[in-house]
Image (cartoon, helix red, strand yellow):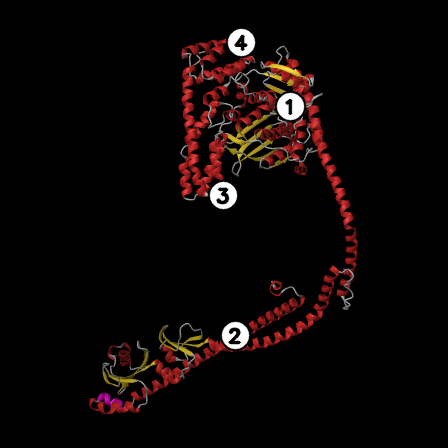
């Protein structure tokens, strides 16, 4: 603060700070003296005033006694007695006697009855009515009292032969009597009290401060005590404080003189200290431009001299270092460049190694898993061999999980994992996880408790695949490390909005306290014996921790050795009213079309496996052993899709894809190409997509995913017979993107219900938005547009989504007027969507009327025959009946699913689906 006001000069700082010290000391000294002097003076004044009060009371008492004695003497005067007895002498003698009696006040003489026979007052009071008068006349004793008028009244009886014949009454104002004995002081005030009631006040001024003394008459002042007289005396406090003010003023003048002297001395001392320092600073500034200038000697011979010498030495060292700095910087830069290149090369090598290892391991794993699944479906396989096959499949999948864990941890560490966003059923996801561990739970004779809080929404928006991976890792560990008891999975809402908490508890071996902090580190388990006993790599918890963080949550653990552990984690999941599509039903629904497929694969085992799976679905397959053969076979045409391995001899998959895309420029026809690769890094996937591959499917191949991808990519009226084509032709509209609808929802009926519900809820939402904008309630408006934007996006209502997003962005920028202008566009897009729903319902009604050919009785007869065929395991009888249903029902999608189950000889599932269809048609099964 001082430096800011007066600068940073050493001289200035010394002067200012010393002056501040002197001023502070002066202020403290003057304040102390003033305080002590004030207290002393006020105490002495208080004592003086108290003594003055006592003196006043004594003098007043003395004067009253004197007056009392004088009146008593007057009452004994013979002239007064004769005048009282003889009325003829009253007028002549009494006035003369009173005039010669030098008493200042009013005198009255009353007879025995109390009536006034003489007075020098203009209007005497009626003494006969006074109680004091009657008592004095009756008793023959004198008395005094204070009247209501503030006067002191003396009553002295007049006796004749010791018998009261009347009385002398003397009345005088108390102030007059008081100030006849005491000289009135101008700086004092006086207050008189009778029995605590103030009767007179002199010299008192409001808003002034006084030193006071208040005393009641004591036994030493007998007459005043009888009157119950109290005197209060006060003097102005300013009279005494003026002495203090004068003293403070004199001390201040002396202090200023001392301050000036101190400043002068300080300046001299400061110069002696600061001048050498300033001289050294000047030399340092010049030395920055001229290295020949030396800072020493300074001539002081003290620490400053040492500082100057040290500075010269350091300057010489810095100059020497500076001369070689450029060479050293260039050398270090070259070393850093080499290190950077080495690190980048190592990163590339690591990525290449992971990709190659992934490919080399996944390629044979593809064949192993694929053929194990094929062998397991062989009906001729006995139970013992089937068990061997199942064991081999479990081991192969365990190895695949280990490979996936290693790749996942690598991708997580490099930040290349991206979360998907889709609608999913949380309760179904949890139930599927429970089912996946059913075999292990049963085998180890453990219990598995699943508790999902009823307050949770059923559907959420998030990444179900990564959430499943986290729960699988933690539940898998819980099952692995538990031999007795069981596992409990709890799912509850967290305290934070849009956050769900999961807890996985077990009754297993637990985790020691000293290992708790390391449990989430890579390749770490509780101890080495755990690895030997239970196996595992220790990657599961590490992957789970990083995925949880990626999903906006955190993970922690509580554990006691030999009692069990509980892993908790939270993730951000947005609840939604949208219904997640049933993936299994969609996949079953989409296997109805038959394609002509070109498969390019150089490994014979993989080629055979893919060929078998595709032909089982009724597809026509042609094969190629390298990219060159694939290009040549493509030239012949006639294929609906190409499955292309990426690493093949002669010509790899990328090069073959590039040739095919170039030929498409001439033909104008695009053929979907799916890359089959054992390399699952995101970098490789990006390269494949950039090379115009339509989709990437990882090895080992999940054929359900492959079939679903094929169905989604192939667009062709000649093979399109499923629900998508039916609705694309019937309900095509610019309001929605039908293809995206089926990709996202899969089931047209579910989608139309959701769309209808949306229109009913949001058809008139613009009126509510208008109301909020008119009142400038942007927070409520933003909540509506944000919700509308999300729901419209999930329903693929492109125009509604874009308009809602535009309004939402305008509200965030505070542009309310612009947002109001966009409400008309929003109302129009919602109106278009509502009209589209009406048109869709009319077309659906027309379609139902056109294709419903079988009566209810006819349908019941067909269903009865189908159920009989199921019981007899007779597909030849069931298949023609199913075809009859396809021609006579609107629920073609459900019939296709039943047909699929019959083709796979799964009569149990076919029967369940058939009964469900009958219930939807209100056809009851009497059997």
Q: Earlier in the sequence, mark 1 or mark 2?
A: 2
Crowding at mark 4 (Cα within 10 Å: few <14, some 14-19, many 20+): some
Q: Nearer the viewer, residue 198 or 624?
A: 624
Q: Earlier in the sequence, mark 4 or mark 1?
A: 1
The label shown at residue 657 is 1
**Dot 1 and dot 2 residues touching (CB under 8 Å):** no
Q: CA distance from mark 3 to mark 2?
A: 68 Å
Element class at badge 2: helix
Task: Tell me the residue that label 3 is attached to.
Answer: 813
Element class at badge 4: helix
- Can see residue 376? no
Task: Tell me the residue that label 2 is attached to.
Answer: 38
Residue 585 location in percent, x, y?
A: 52, 21
Element class at badge 1: helix
Boundaries of the magenta span: 78-85
**Dot 3 and dot 2 residues touching (CB under 8 Å):** no
Which residue occupies 61% across, 68% down? 20
Q: CA distance from mark 4 to mark 3?
A: 65 Å
Element class at badge 3: loop
Q: Nearer the viewer, mark 4 or mark 1?
A: 1
Residue 161 location in percent, x, y?
A: 26, 87
Task: Tell me the residue that label 4 is attached to.
Answer: 875
Q: CA distance from mark 4 to mark 2?
A: 121 Å
Q: Residue furthest front?
A: 666
The quadrant of the image that shows the N terminus is: bottom right
- Can see residue 815? yes
Residue 330 location in percent, x, y?
A: 76, 46
Q: Nearer the viewer, mark 3 or mark 2?
A: 3
């Amino acid at each position: 603060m001082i430096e800011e006001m007066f600068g940073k000069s050493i001289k200035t700082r010394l002067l200012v700070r010393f002056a501040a010290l002197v001023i502070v000391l002066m202020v403290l000294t003057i304040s102390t003296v003033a305080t002590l002097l004030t207290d002393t003076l006020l105490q002495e004044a208080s004592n003086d005033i108290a003594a003055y009060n006592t003196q006043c009371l004594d003098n007043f008492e003395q004067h009253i006694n004197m007056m009392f004695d004088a009146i008593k003497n007057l009452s004994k005067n013979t002239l007064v007695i004769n005048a009282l007895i003889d009325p003829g002498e009253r007028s002549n003698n009494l006035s003369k006697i009173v005039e010669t009696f030098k008493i200042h006040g009013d005198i009255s003489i009353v007879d025995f009855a109390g009536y006034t026979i003489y007075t020098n007052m203009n209007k005497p009071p009626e003494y006969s009515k006074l109680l004091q008068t009657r008592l004095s006349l009756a008793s023959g004793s004198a008395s005094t009292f204070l009247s209501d008028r503030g006067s002191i009244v003396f009553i002295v009886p007049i006796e004749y032969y010791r018998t009261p014949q009347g009385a002398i009454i003397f009345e005088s104002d108390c102030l007059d009597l008081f100030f006849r004995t005491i000289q009135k002081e101008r700086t004092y005030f006086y207050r008189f009290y009778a029995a605590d009631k103030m009767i007179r006040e002199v010299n008192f001024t409001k808003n002034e401060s006084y030193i006071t003394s208040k005393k009641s008459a004591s036994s030493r002042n007998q007459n005043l005590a009888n009157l119950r007289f109290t005197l209060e005396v006060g003097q102005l406090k300013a009279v005494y404080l003026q002495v203090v003010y004068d003293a403070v003023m004199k001390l201040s003048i002396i202090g200023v003189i001392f301050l000036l002297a101190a400043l002068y001395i300080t300046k001299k001392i400061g110069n002696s200290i600061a001048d050498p320092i300033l001289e050294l600073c000047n030399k340092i500034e010049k030395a920055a431009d001229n290295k020949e200038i030396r800072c020493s000697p300074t001539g002081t011979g003290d620490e400053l001299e040492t500082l100057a010498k040290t500075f010269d030495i350091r300057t010489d060292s810095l100059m020497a270092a500076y001369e070689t700095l450029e060479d050293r910087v260039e050398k270090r830069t070259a070393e850093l460049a080499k290190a950077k290149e080495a690190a980048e090369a190592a990163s590339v090598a690591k990525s290449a190694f992971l990709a190659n290892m992934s490919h080399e391991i996944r390629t044979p794993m593809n064949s192993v898993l694929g053929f194990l699944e094929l062998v397991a479906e062989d009906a001729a396989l006995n139970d013992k061999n089937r068990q061997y096959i199942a064991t081999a499949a479990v081991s192969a999948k365990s190895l695949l999980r280990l490979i996936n864990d290693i790749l996942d941890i690598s991708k997580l560490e490099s930040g290349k994992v991206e979360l998907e966003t889709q609608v999913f059923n949380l309760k179904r996801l949890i139930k599927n996880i429970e089912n996946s561990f059913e075999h292990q739970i049963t085998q180890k004779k453990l219990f598995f408790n699943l508790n999902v809080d009823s307050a949770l929404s059923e559907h959420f928006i998030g990444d179900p695949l990564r959430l499943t991976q986290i729960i699988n890792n933690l539940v898998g560990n819980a099952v692995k490390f538990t031999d007795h008891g069981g596992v409990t999975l709890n799912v509850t809402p967290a305290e934070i909005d849009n956050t769900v908490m999961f807890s996985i508890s077990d009754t297993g071996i637990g985790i020691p306290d000293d290992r708790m902090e390391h449990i989430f580190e890579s390749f770490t388990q509780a101890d080495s014996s755990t690895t030997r006993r239970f196996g595992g790599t220790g990657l599961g918890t590490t992957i789970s921790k990083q995925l949880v963080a990626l999903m906006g949550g955190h993970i922690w653990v509580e554990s006691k050795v030999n009692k069990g552990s509980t892993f908790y984690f939270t993730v951000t999941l947005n609840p939604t009213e949208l219904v997640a599509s049933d993936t299994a039903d969609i996949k079953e629904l989409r296997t109805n079309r038959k394609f002509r497929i070109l498969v390019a694969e150089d490994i014979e085992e993989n080629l055979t496996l893919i060929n078998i799976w595709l032909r089982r679905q009724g597809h026509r397959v042609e094969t190629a052993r390298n990219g060159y053969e694939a290009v040549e076979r493509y030239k012949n045409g006639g294929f609906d899709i190409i499955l292309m391995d990426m690493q093949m001899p002669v010509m790899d998959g990328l090069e073959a894809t590039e040739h095919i895309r170039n030929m498409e420029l001439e033909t104008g026809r695009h053929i979907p190409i799916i890359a089959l690769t054992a390399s699952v890094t995101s970098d490789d996937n990006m390269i494949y997509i950039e090379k115009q591959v339509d989709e990437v499917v990882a090895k080992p191949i999940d054929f359900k995913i492959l079939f679903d991808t094929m169905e989604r990519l192939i667009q062709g009226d000649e093979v399109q017979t499923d629900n998508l084509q039916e609705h694309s032709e019937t309900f095509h509209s610019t309001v929605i993107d039908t293809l995206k609808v089926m990709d996202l929802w899969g089931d047209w009926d579910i989608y139309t219900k959701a769309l209808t519900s949306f229109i009913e809820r949001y058809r008139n939402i613009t009126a509510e938005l208008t109301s909020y904008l008119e009142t400038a309630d942007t927070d409520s408006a933003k909540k509506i547009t944000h919700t509308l934007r999300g729901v419209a996006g999930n329903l693929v209502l492109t125009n509604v989504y874009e308009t809602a997003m535009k309004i939402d962005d305008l509200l965030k920028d505070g542009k309310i007027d612009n947002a109001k202008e966009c409400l008309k566009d929003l109302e129009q897009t919602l109106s278009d969507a509502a009209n589209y729903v009406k048109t869709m319902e009319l077309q659906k009604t027309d379609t139902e009327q056109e294709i419903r050919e079988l009566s209810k009785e006819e349908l019941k007869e067909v269903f009865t025959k189908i159920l009989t065929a199921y019981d007899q395991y007779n597909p030849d009888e069931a298949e023609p009946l199913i075809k009859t249903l396809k021609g006579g029902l609107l629920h073609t999608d459900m019939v296709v699913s039943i047909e699929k189950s019959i083709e796979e000889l799964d009569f149990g599932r076919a029967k369940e689906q058939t009964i469900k269809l009958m219930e939807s048609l209100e056809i009851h099964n009497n059997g």
